[in-house]
Amino acid sequence: MLTRLAREFYRPAAPRELAQELELALHLVEKALASLCARGVLKRGEEGYCFNPGADLIAGYFQTHPRGYGFVHTGDDRQYYVPPGTARGAGDGDIVLAEVQAREPGKAPLVQITDILHRRQRYLVGQFRAGSGLGSVQDGTRKILIPVRAARGAREGAGVVVAVSGYEGRVVCTLPDEDLGRLDLLNIAARRGILPLFPPAVEEEAARLAAQDLGRREDMRDMAVVTVDGQDVWDLDDGFSLFRLENGNWLLGVHVADVAHYVAGGSALDREALRRSFSVYLLDREIPMLPARLSRDLCSLLPGRERPAVSCLVELTPAGQVVSFRFAETVICSRARLTYQQAAEGRCGPWQQLIAAAMQLAGALAQRRRQRGAAYIALPATAIVLDAAGRPLAMGPRRWDAAREMVEEFMILANELAAEYLHQRGMAFLHRGNAGFHPGRGEEVNAFIARWGYKLQYPPPARELQQFLDRLQGRPEMVPVSRKLARCLQKSRYSAAPLGHYNLALERYTHFSSPIRRYSDLFVQRQIKAAVRGVQAPELARELPRAAELCSYKERLVQDVEGECLEQKKLEYLEARPGEIFAATVADTTPGGPWVMLDNTAEGMVVAGSRSKLQEYVPGDRVQIKVHKLDYRAKQAYFALAGVDSGQE
């Protein structure tokens, strides 16, 4: 019963529904539910029984971390901390039962796993080795044996996805040869249950789709719509149009691919998209949320192709103030596929005047957000270039140019207006928000920044935070202080109830601009379409809590996978440069040594050098270091002071 409730991600269930699914007598189910409610494990609402996420006995999905610890995810986007070595054999995606051992303000409660209610199927990706009667795939230090009957014709050296049971496995599919240099990244994802293949029923449903009747839509095919995205991106789910009105204002159109036009609620495609919830980006490889037939064809706003869209049309003053807006189901035809690089360098040909005007308007929108009190903690993101074999050739900070900022501003505005549009019509919708800083960490933050003479009201209002961050620009302490503040800020999440968005200084916000890549956006797109048509869509309202919980959980999972892939390649980059001297900034101090952020965006701890010298460093100091040792299992780098024998501890 507990497994069933947790597996459905906390969707309430009535006693009769549970009795039918579990094939038990109704009176026995009711008795068990009453007992669990009395113990505080479950709670009863209008729609049935569900978990009480604040109880001392909790159930949820287990998620591991490379450094040995883990978390149990439960309803209301709560996380419970599982210390290293206490997982009792639980793996990623397993549903576990756990008891709360300690609660501390500002931190995830500490729990002890008491039982594993459901084990997820284990997968790995590797290179197939043929043998006489038995094939195999290496799984770290152990070998997974694959009988001939389970090899599905895999050839020697092929990349394969393998379902594992104990020390035996079966080949699920063979990967394209171009993926051979990315098997390590695909394996990181597969271990978390994220696979590059779709179930046959999903592929078959996608293959049957064809361009559908677009006649009952507002015709905007004559409008000059362009897309601006990365050079290698082909899931083009948003574009924009812009022209000046007679009154001197701008009419901005943000046109989003109408994925809901093809993906019906409850279909095989929809169920798989919900299960995945996000497209996953493994540096230069993508594991899409939707099959290529949709993500790269029918739903992609390819130039010269007529496409159904959901459009946000907004009149703006030159200063970026919203005069009016509306949403519509439309049919559009993109005129050009532009890249960020083209837009940033002014190489847009006949579309250069449009892009120049769009960048100017985006700058006004950014200023409008700042005046509203929005705050953004900027930390360097990483750009890594891999060769065909997956070896990192170059690594450094990702350049965030004006073209990316332009698209970002337009999408933020469209998402903001989508939330306002649904709110005005009294519809419950999927909120995206951020509750601000974790409580109970003010003393820690102020003790850290006091060394530079700063003090912050904690939690700081967003406007005051941005003013403080502006003071840090160009100063040595900017990186360590920004890092400390970012680690104290709660992550954004999805919610069925209004949440507010601290960073954007908004009462309400949602996501709808990337429905090819995020299920949350597809869900909200359906809600917008219902509002445009003037219908209530009660089935969406019923699914709202579950969609919010699942999307929040999957987002954490995807972030972990993408982060682990990034850390893997950072270590490989460092390993390929033995003895090289790197420049770094001390970000924090730890009992083991200074924690540093390298100029190339790698991070780690300096452990080799005289203990007295290591203890002299404080956050903000610049330091020259070299690699001391690398721990691939924990995804951890250790450094030595430059000029110090790497054997000195």
Image (spheres, rainbow, N blue to C red):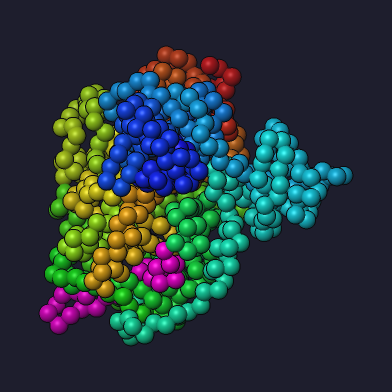
638, above or below 222, in the image: above
- Position of the N terminus by quadrant: top left
Residue 338: tell me if it is visible. no
Q: In the shown orientation, is residue 71 left or right of residue 285?
A: left
Which residue is located at x 48 percent, y 46 percent?
21
Which residue is located at x 58 percent, y 55 percent?
196
Q: What is the x, y in percent for residue 387?
A: 61, 53
Task: Please tell me in which quadrant of the rendered image residue 102 appears.
Answer: top left
Residue 133: tell me if it is visible. yes
Which residue is located at x 53 percent, y 56 percent?
286
Q: In the shown orientation, is residue 401 left or right of residue 501?
A: right
Which residue is located at x 24 percent, y 31 percent?
439
426, above or below 440, in the image: below
Q: Which residues are magenta?
A: 238-265
Q: What is the x, y in percent for residue 163?
A: 65, 45
From this viewpoint, which residue is outermost toward the top?
612
Residue 244 forms part of the magenta stretch: yes
Q: What is the x, y in percent for residue 59?
A: 42, 33
595, above or below 528, in the image: above
Q: Nearer the viewer, residue 387 or 305?
A: 305
Residue 137 forms part of the magenta stretch: no
From this viewpoint, which residue is outermost toward the right?
132
Q: What is the x, y in percent for residue 530?
A: 29, 68
Q: Nearer the viewer, residue 346 or 148?
A: 148
Task: Please tell me in which quadrant of the rendered image residue 35 appears.
Answer: top left
